[in-house]
Amino acid sequence: MTFCPELEGWTEPPPVSPTEPEGAVPGPSALDTSPPLLRAEGLSVFFTGPSGEIQALENVSLTVTSGEFLCIVGPSGCGKSTLLRLLAGLLRPTHGSVWLNEEPLTRPRRQIGIVFQKANLMPWRTVRQNVALPLEIAGLDPEETRRRAEALIALVGLSGFEDAYPAELSGGMAQRVAIARALIHDPELLLLDEPFGSLDALTREQMALELLRIWQAQRKTVVMVTHSIPEAVFLGDRVLVMSARPGQIRAIIPVPLPRPRHGEILASETFGRLTQQVRQAIEPFSREGEPPPFSTAGEGRR
């Protein structure tokens, strides 16, 4: 499997208007009238730096429905990670509000799990102990904690490594542990901040398949930041495209690919059209002098 946007057989898609749509982002189904799990309205963020005030986000509004997999892409430094921290309750917006289950989100909650680019495992704790840490802190029964930790270790494909230490794990294995740890308290919402950005290309591809398998098993609501357009299209129900700083929502690309998805879909004409459509949506907002966006797995400011 290769996340390669230059696929043979696809036809040129229609141009995407960079100003459509703006404002609130609809859910994956127009027939779904239930309240969104996650809602953000009018988010703007300003930071004060050595050279003065910097605006990271401007008037960002979105909704995410229960069970949806939403991917966020955009130029380096456009505020994707800032947006994710707002949705996690780790950062307060300068303007605007976030709601989880129609309740204001002003601090981190147990209903939210988050995985960062680095696994951030405690080196003196085993895989089992790292996964179990949130439940230990919460004071859950040790036997129940062990049972749930081992079930999640099996889910992420690490059975047999329960007693291994982080130094004995590959980068992909460490990220699986981080995902299991984020799921241990059964969150409603899983936030992923470029979780595979530090991995080599082959491991990244394998981890995307693993993440899709885990999501299909649990159907958590997922919001994922990624630099890879093909990865976003392969995983997501929708792809949210942000403009250069200050970050704004400039396009929403629905992904009508059937589920469950497998690696073979990457060679389809539809997949090729969708990746090109997302690319066309984002290129007008790339900064002058930057390399073409998403030509590789991508690193840099987020």
Image (tube, rainbow, N blue to C red):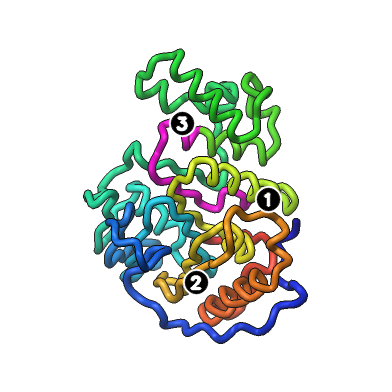
- Is the Cβ of the residue at disc 1 closer than 8 Å to that at disc 2? no
The one nearer the camera, 112 or 86, is 112
Q: Which residue corresponds to mark 2?
A: 253
Q: Amino acid at mark 2?
A: Ile
Displayed quadrant of residue 137:
top left
Label 1 secondary element? helix
Mark 3 neighbour density, 10 Å: few (under 14) some (14–19) many (20 or more): many
Residue 291 seen from this side: no
Q: Which residue corresponds to mark 3?
A: 184
Q: Sequence order check: which comes first, mark 3 or mark 2?
A: 3
Q: Residue at x 41, y 24 (%)?
A: 135
The one nearer the camera, 205 or 69, is 69
Q: Residue at x 40, y 67 (%)?
A: 51
- Image position, residue 192 (x, y; %): 50, 49
Q: Is residue 233 magenta?
A: no
The residues tagged by marks 3 and 2 sit, at their Cα atoms, a distance apart of: 31 Å
Q: Amino acid at mark 3?
A: Ile
Q: Residue at x 59, y 22 (%)?
A: 126
Q: Residue at x 65, y 26 (%)?
A: 159
- Image position, residue 21 (x, y; %): 39, 78
The residues tagged by marks 1 and 3 sit, at their Cα atoms, a distance apart of: 23 Å
Magenta span? 181-198
Q: Sequence order check: which comes first, mark 1 or mark 3?
A: 3
Label 3 secondary element? loop
Q: Is residue 188 magenta?
A: yes
Q: Which residue corresponds to mark 1?
A: 204
- Image position, residue 177 (x, y; %): 58, 33
Residue 140 seen from this side: yes
Q: Sequence order check: which comes first, mark 1 or mark 2?
A: 1
